[in-house]
Image: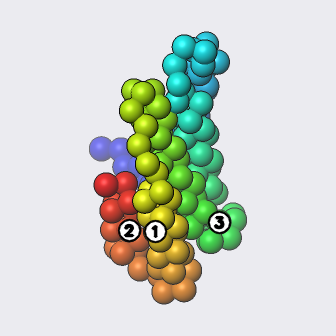
Amino acid sequence: MIQLDMRTVVFLAAIGYLVCTALVIQLWQQNRDRFEGLGLMSLNFILQSAAMGLIVSRGAIPDWLSIWVANMLAMLGALLIYIGLERFLRKPGPQRHNHVLLAVCSIAFGWYSLIQPDLPLRALILTLFLL
């Protein structure tokens, strides 16, 4: 059985994100006049691809960049795709609580990444934010 290391898996995921990003940007360019929210969805994929690129670069760039910034880009992308879907469905809602949640999670994630490293707690913070 072939065993892949995590760097290979993450690298392949980054390539997948780049392909999806190109496809979503093309769909946005073709349909931006017809559907609202596609621009935010495209921005989400750009942020997710950037996050994957930073994660792939781990070891070659500082840890704060490959851990904290990468995860903040991923969280911001998740928030943007949520707002984009609301606009796409024409059911926008208030977002103040989501912005506060992003700020709180950013601070907590930074604390448990850089000052007092705790991987299980970072995974919990990310999961709760995405929930």
The residue lying at 62 percent from left, 71 percent from top is 63
Q: Quadrant of the N terminus?
A: top left
Circle 3 Cα neighbour tier, 10 Å, few/some/many (<14 / 14–19 / ≥20): some
User: What type is the residue that disc 1 sits on?
Assistant: Cys
Q: Which residue is mark 1?
A: 105
Q: Which residue is mark 2?
A: 125
Quick one: 89 or 113, which is closer to the camera?
89
N-terminal-most mark, 2 or 1: 1
Marks 1/3 in contact by CB < 8 Å: the verdict is: no
User: What type is the residue that disc 2 sits on?
Assistant: Ile
Q: Which residue is mark 3?
A: 65
**Relative to residue 27, is residue 109 depicted above or below?**
below
- Nearer the observer, disc 2 or disc 1? 1
Quick one: 83 or 71, which is closer to the camera?
83
SS category of the residue bearing label 1: helix
Question: Disc 3 to disc 2, how far (Cα)?
Answer: 18 Å
Q: Is residue 8 visible?
A: no
SS category of the residue bearing label 2: helix
N-terminal-most mark, 3 or 2: 3
Question: Disc 1 to disc 3, how far (Cα)?
Answer: 16 Å
Q: Quadrant of residue 34?
A: top right
Marks 2/1 in contact by CB < 8 Å: the verdict is: yes
Compared across the picture, whether 20 is left or right of 86 comes to: right
**Relative to residue 36, is residue 1 depicted above or below?**
below
User: What type is the residue that disc 3 sits on?
Assistant: Leu
Question: Disc 2 to disc 1, how far (Cα)?
Answer: 7 Å
Query: Picture coordinates of residue 96 (x, y %)?
Result: 48, 57
Q: Is residue 33 visible?
A: yes
Query: Picture coordinates of residue 42 (x, y %)?
Result: 58, 32
